[in-house]
Amino acid sequence: MPTPHGPWTIKSTEQIYRDPFVELTLDQVIRPDGNDGQHVVVKIKPGVCVVAVDEDRNVHLTKEFHYAVGRDSVEAVSGGVEPDEDADLTAQRELQEELGLEAESWKFLTTVDPFTTIMESPTRLYLATGLSEVATNPEGTEQIEHVVIPLADAAKMVANGEITHAPSCVAILMAESILS
């Protein structure tokens, strides 16, 4: 049975691919102009992105090679929310695993949708302050360099295109606005 979806109507959905991180579906649709069509939807596991700022207003970022883009990327701590895991706990876990940090204070900033045309990938952004060091526990796929720079410099890196990870860009700029 057709299902309304905003100005679109979904006639059917076929799952093309699925693994623990991504699902690809192909919808047969009636477009807003009334014509039949197809629409691909990529669903990425929900995620978190944490901007960790210390008492000296330095931001703690990661630098690591990311396979999909084929280069090193400087970004805020990020990770996927496991099924049945609370996103707030995911943020805390990722900060500890990737940078060996715990935070005394957590502020939820917002949820961003990095690419809304064909992708469903909600990412919750957090500001973590009151930092203290603990042991790291990176995943086997991660070789992470801990980067510590002034928050204002990180915002400049966003503005000049040196930081390109979209959730990190939003989180860094929001953190700078909140803390200035």
Image (cartoon, rainbow, N blue to C red):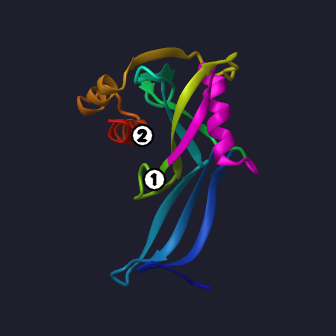
Q: Residue 48: percent from the left, percent from the top?
A: 56, 42
Q: Which mark is residue 147?
A: none
Whole-angstrom CA distance, mark 2 to mark 1, is 13 Å
Instruction: For mark 2, give the secondary structure.
Output: helix
Residue under the image location 41 percent in, 80 percent down: 7
Residue at 45% of width from left, 57% of height from top?
Answer: 118
Horizontal side, residue 177 vs residue 77: left or right: left
Residue found 44% across the figure and 41% down from its top: 167
Residue situated in front as seen by the camera: 133 or 93: 133
Q: Is residue 176 above or below residue 122?
A: above
The residue tagged with tag 1: helix, strand or loop? loop
Residue drawn at (46%, 68%) of the image: 38
Quarter containing the N terminus? bottom right
Whether residue 44 appears in this view of the structure is: yes
Say whether residue 97 is magenta: yes
Q: Give the percent coordinates (x, y) of residue 79.
A: 59, 36
Q: Is residue 97 left or right of residue 152?
A: right
Q: Amino acid at mark 2?
A: Ala
User: Would you call the spot at circle 1 few (<14 residues within 10 Å), some (14-19), or many (20 or more)?
Assistant: some
| Count of marks, rendered view | 2
Q: Is residue 77 left or right of residue 56?
A: right
Amino acid type at image mark 1? Asp
Report if the CB atoms under discs 2 and 1 are less than 8 Å apart.
Answer: no
Q: Which residues are magenta?
A: 83-108
Disc marking residue 113: 1
Pick whichever, 167 or 103, lies toward us.
103
Examine the image and state in which quarter residue 15 appears.
bottom right
Q: Nearer the viewer, residue 131 or 63?
A: 131
Q: Quarter of the image holding residue 6?
A: bottom left
* Residue 71 in view, yes or no: no
Residue marked by disc 2? 171
